[in-house]
Image (cartoon, helix red, strand yellow):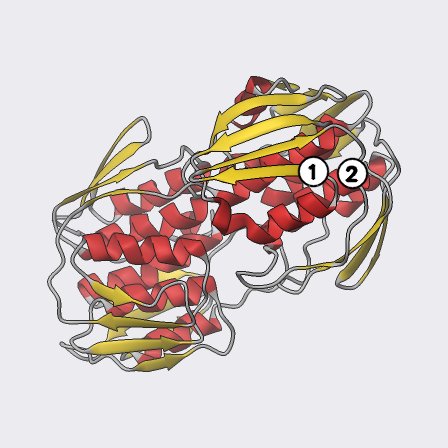
Amino acid sequence: MSYYEIQGGRPLEGRLEIHGAKNSVLPILAAALLAPGESVIENCPDLSDVSATLDILRLLGCRVEREGDRVAIDASVLSRCQIPEQLMREMRSSVIFLGALLARLGEAELFYPGGCELGPRPIDLHLAALRALGAEILEEQGSLCCHQTQTNPAGREICLSIPSVGATENAMLAACGCESTTTIVGAAREPEIVDLQNFLRSMGARVSGAGGSVITVEGGVPLHPTRYRVMGDRMAAATYLCAGAAARGAVELVGVDPDTLTAVLACLSQAGCEIHTGENFIAMEQWGLLRGIPPVRTAPYPGFPTDAQAVLMAALAGGEGSTMFVENIFDSRYGHVDELRRMGADIQVDGRVAVVQGVGRLRGATLRGTDLRGAAALVVAALGAEGMSTLSQLRHIRRGYENFARNLRQLGGEIRELP
């Protein structure tokens, strides 16, 4: 089993191009099922979650070819609507195929999805949205057997009780297969949903409102294959910024919209980082100790993203002063805290609240990745720590970061992957 060896204490400096967004490309790849013919997705990152998604597309009958960051998907003929349990368990986002398959074929057979262990993440909202659009869904021993009860299902109003990103995306895809207008009320507002809307529009779909809380999908429109470039990954950008802040130095990131990271940039600025932004780039400079900041409360977009909580905590743990984190999205997203404590971090957890007292400098330790963002946070901490750290369970990292170690070396980090 491979692991990272990280020598901390070296400043990070340089320029880095951010890869395509994991949380955008997965629903976009599923959406390619909606139109017969070949669609081309550009800026598609090389991640294990993407590989699993491409395997599902191949299994469904698509011809898939990859060359660099360009993926061509020919969905002319779909030979099946079933996805086996093994593939479904590889990632949480696999549930997005429900909406796409119902829209294209009128039926789907899947299993409950897997992914990181972050506490209960029920898909009830997904299923309720699809049922509202006429789908009959039978749940039995972990499987989901779905079929559209009408030949030409009608659109309708769907009200989401919470702004679930996945449920919003599934509803958007399923609505493309309806004959009339669907309105999604209480929709999630994340930039990745805007990216999905833009992709669907490039296929000819009439979708509007993404980025706000009400999304409208006008059904009955024939869709066609398209070529589309995925947005930059704001969570990868947040990770590299926090790594630069923890290790100190000056980092410039290109290929990412700073407007999608307003809450994270505000926290880094409060902690003492100097931030400069422009069209499609973010520059961060930080040479001293990070200081404590006002409470960080995770919230749906445009609030502070839960995916950036761990990496910011890791950076602040090696600074000075106190910061309180309140995790409002997931029940179990402090798995990285015990590992940070191995490095000398002073973090007290009570339920959803974690209080971080900066210790000035963390120290190297033997670490184990807990989940995708938790594992990235441990790399952030190790880069800013004194001495050597090792990190195992790299499969988490590969789910969301392309060439993570190589990119950090490009910025001057001393990190290598060993077998």
Is any part of residue 83 visible from this angle?
A: no
Closer to the N terminus: mark 1 or mark 2?
1
- Name the foreground residue: 245 vs 117: 245
> What residue is at 34 percent from the left and 78 percent from the top?
131
Q: Nearer the viewer, mark 1 or mark 2?
A: 1
Q: In the image, is residue 18 above or below residue 107?
A: above
Residue 298: image x %, image y %?
64, 60
> What residue is at 40 percent from the left and 38 percent from the top?
20
Which three-letter amino acid code belongs to the residue tagged 1? Cys
Q: Image quadrant of residue 341? A: top right
Marks 1 and 2, Cα distance to the nearest angstrom? 8 Å
Q: Image quadrant of residue 7? A: top right
* Mark 1 closeness class: few <14, some 14–19, many ≥20 residues within 10 Å: many
Q: Is residue 84 left or right of residue 220?
A: right
- Name the foreground residue: 266 vs 337: 266
Location of the C terminus by quadrant is: top right
Secondary element at tag 2: loop
> What residue is at 41 percent from the left and 32 percent from the top?
46
* Mark 2 closeness class: few <14, some 14–19, many ≥20 residues within 10 Å: many
Do the residues under discs 1 and 2 have CB atoms within 8 angstroms? yes
Residue 41: image x %, image y %?
27, 40
Q: Is residue 61 left or right of residue 88?
A: left
Residue 225: image x %, image y %?
15, 48
Specify the label residue 156 is tagged with.
none
Residue at the spot of label 1: 273
Specify the label residue 290 is tagged with.
2
Q: Is residue 101 left or right of residue 281?
A: left
> What residue is at 67 percent from the left and 42 percent from the top?
311
